[in-house]
Image: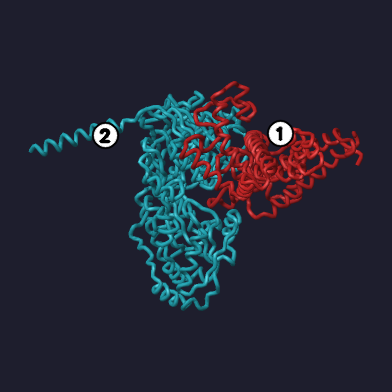
Amino acid sequence: MLKKVLLVVTVVAFTCVGAALAAPKPGGTLVFGRGGDSVGLDPAYETDGNSFMIGDNVLEALIFYKDESVDLEPGLAESWNISPDGLTYTFKLRKGVKFHDGTPFNADAVVFSHGRQMKERKIKFFGKGWEIPAQERTPEYWVSMEMDKTVDAIEAVDEHTVVYKLKRVEAPFLANLGMDFADIISPTAFMKNPKEFVRNPVGTGPFKFVKWVKDDQIILEKNKEYWDKKGGPYLDKVVFRAIPENSVRFLELKTGNVHICQFPNPADIALASKDPKMKLISQPGMNIGYLGFNHTKEPWKSNAKLRKAVAMAINRKAIVDNIYQGQGQLAKNNIPPTMWGYNDAVPQVEYSVDKAKAMLAEAGFPEGKGLDEITLWSMPVARPYNPEGLKVGVAMVADLAKIGIRARVVSYEWGTYLKRQRDQPPDMDLFQLGWTGDNGDPDNFLAVLFDGMASSAIRTQWQNQAYHELMEQGRQTTDQTKRAEIYKKANLLLYEEMAVIPIAHSTVTWPMQKKVMDFKLHPTASIRMKNVWLEK
Amino acid sequence: MAAYIIRRILILFPTLLGVSVIIFLMLHITPGDPAELLLGERASEEALHELREHLGLNKPFYVQYGMFIKRLATLDLGETIWTRQKVWIEIKQRFPATIELSVAALMISCTLGMIFGIISATKQYSIFDYLSMLGALAGVSMPIFWLGLVFMLIFAVNLGWLPISGRLSVGVDLEVVTNFYILDAILTQNWEAFRDAVWHLIMPAFTLSTIPTAIVARMTRSAMLEVLRQDYIKTAKAKGLSQFKVIFKHALRNALIPVVTTIGLQFGVLLGGAILTETIFAWPGVGKWMYDAVMQRDYMVIQNGTMFIAGLFVIINLSVDVLYAVINPRISVK
């Protein structure tokens, strides 16, 4: 009995202490060490993570992704309603929200923020509205998420209601509205100086933009009038410092000048794990690194057995262990395991030289006879989904040699690589590439990467009627459970046909000081400081 | 004299035109497409086309070159591809950082290099001579990248004397006037920022100065040795002048001429070496900026940034030559 009482007392005591420890303390300046400076701060025109991470804290969208997943939750829109035909979306906006410049957030601001990205601006303001200046350049994400093909018109019905009329049923539409490019900006601030907004963003976010010293730092300060009274912002200031050299950035963390260190060298992660003043945070990245085939030419185009033989011959686990240095997870689907629609029933491709040889013979090329020397295009740069393309290429060539396939590594400067790969030239047999997800929707992986029938711009150019139909269905079904089933089938089909060989999903691991509390890595790679606080 | 100056100014234009042709050709022969790099894996055919159209990359080469020259003629450096900012403003923000770093490095290398050189020359074949020349050899051969990291480990991480990187500590406010932080701190009488800016400058400046220090030391040594053998030095010594007076008043002045020329040349080298130093020390200067621009194929930055720097060098050269002519009228006659 006494033991039980003691146990209960201990548990209660620990819970109390835990609760006291966990209570966030406001104040302090957090310094975030990152690899490069932002390019620009206008959400409509940016394409890089370093730019978006400022927007993640200064600007907000109608829809938010939940704290640690890509599930959606209300953001600046309190609620929404989809018409039965799936073509009209009505958003009820949050009331009493103000931009950092003091102007009110309302339906017209939404129409302005999205309307300015449309090619044909079919928009209607509720109030006086603005004469939006012509686009200075293409809003890249708006175009690549096919928003012009999806959205027909945007109308502000009243102060707090916006209606989107769509041209086609598009299930990922809501998820798209949670992305950075869909952030709502202050029209007044933009119209004051349209050319300078890119350097002076004004939104509704938990932090206000203060100052930008190019290639050095961007300073944000707490938005004291932030609308959401639950949680943060707790920090007085956040400083994003650009420190290009990985090891120097880690040294700054070690000496306490930086609180969080982005993209450390793998060797430094091991050091950080032993340092009593540091802790590590890890998150499986929303990405896939894969090895593709040139589906525009034979023998790759119609010989699935040959593709399978290649897949079995490559020791992908060794690649993940040695080249990703453990910062990755062996892939069996072509979408990350954290995403809905992931099919756990898809078997892992077995690595076996003997079976690969047998399969190669079945494919009509016993011991590689009949196959000329093939090229294996390997990426010249580190990408989030593949840390060292050239090393991966060399390892694969060695593996292929074991079953009798002669291959050589080919590489180009990154821009040329991307350009030539798109053209699917005959001198390309196998190629490495990958993808980092934009909106957490499986369509953003499975259709964008593998549905070659949808467009000639699809990088794998794999053409399969059944797969194409699945993708169409997925887009036109709004019920998520049904969609998940469709994408599970698609994942299985990709495996059965071995359209590409999935290699790995890389893991993001960052060291930070122990006193940084409640910092979470998000699957979309957004950096949110809202609920972060510093233990004194 | 006036004719000489006019002639020199007229030569300036074909020189710059030549530079523009070389940059333009090199840039367009180098593989890589800014649109492709800007959009990465997700680039749709349509987005790529529109971006190329917007940037004028779809136009024939000679039209693109014509546009480049037309802008230059009106002293317009255009707008960068990536950050969509005026190239001139980007230069204005970064150039002072590079100049500040290079001038500090040059000052260090002049002082140290000359001291080592003089002592080595006067104590030829002594242990000091061997040590300092060995040091000079090491200084020339040491990779800046590695040296910078070693300095950081010793002076910042282990001893804690100096900050690791950046130009100012987080939290130190400085009202920017000229973007030369040390100068700005003096102008606004912000002594905390002054101390902090100098503190941040020491390590990168020393790292950057190693190669020029070594070169200046070797040049000073050989020039001094040459001069010390001259008859007038013997005469000075025979007159009974002190060693100090002989070296500093008679020998050094004459030995300085080739040394000063070397120092002038080193300044250009310093600006080049600044790329590495700026990268390691997160120093927001023009070197790192140009390097990134090359990696991203930001044609506007590369073309116009290079033209700006080339123009600056040509003008400085011109002024120096004109000054020579003023001092020594024989030059303009030739």
Query: x%, y% of residue B173?
Result: 53, 26
Q: Is residue A64 left or right of residue A134?
A: left
Q: Secondary structure at mark 2?
A: helix
Q: Chain of mark 2?
A: A
Vertical side of B63 occupied by A259: above or below: above
Which colour scheme appears in the figure? by chain
Looking at the rendered structure, the kind of residue marked 1 is Phe
Q: For residue B80, what is the image quadrant? A: top right
| Quarter occupied by the C terminus of chain B | top right
Q: Secondary structure at mark 1?
A: helix
| Quarter occupied by the N terminus of chain B | top right
Structural crowding at the residue carrying mark 1, measured as other residues with C-alpha within 10 Å and reported as few (<14), some (14–19) or many (≥20)? few
Residue for point 42% across, 65% down: A315
Q: CA distance from mark 1 to mark 2?
A: 74 Å
Q: For residue B250, what is the image quadrant? A: top right
What residue does disc 1 label? B244
Q: In front of the other: label 1 or label 2?
A: 1
What residue does disc 2 label? A18
The single residue placed furthest to the top in the displayed view is B189
Q: Is residue A245 left or right of residue A195?
A: left
Query: x%, y% of residue B43?
Result: 56, 51
The hue of chain A in the figure is cyan
Q: Is residue A78 left or right of residue A382?
A: left
Name the residue nearer the viewer: B334 or B118.
B118
Query: x%, y% of residue A146?
Result: 52, 47
Name the residue nearer the viewer: A116 or A530.
A530
Query: x%, y% of residue B139?
Result: 61, 47
Q: Chain of mark 1?
A: B
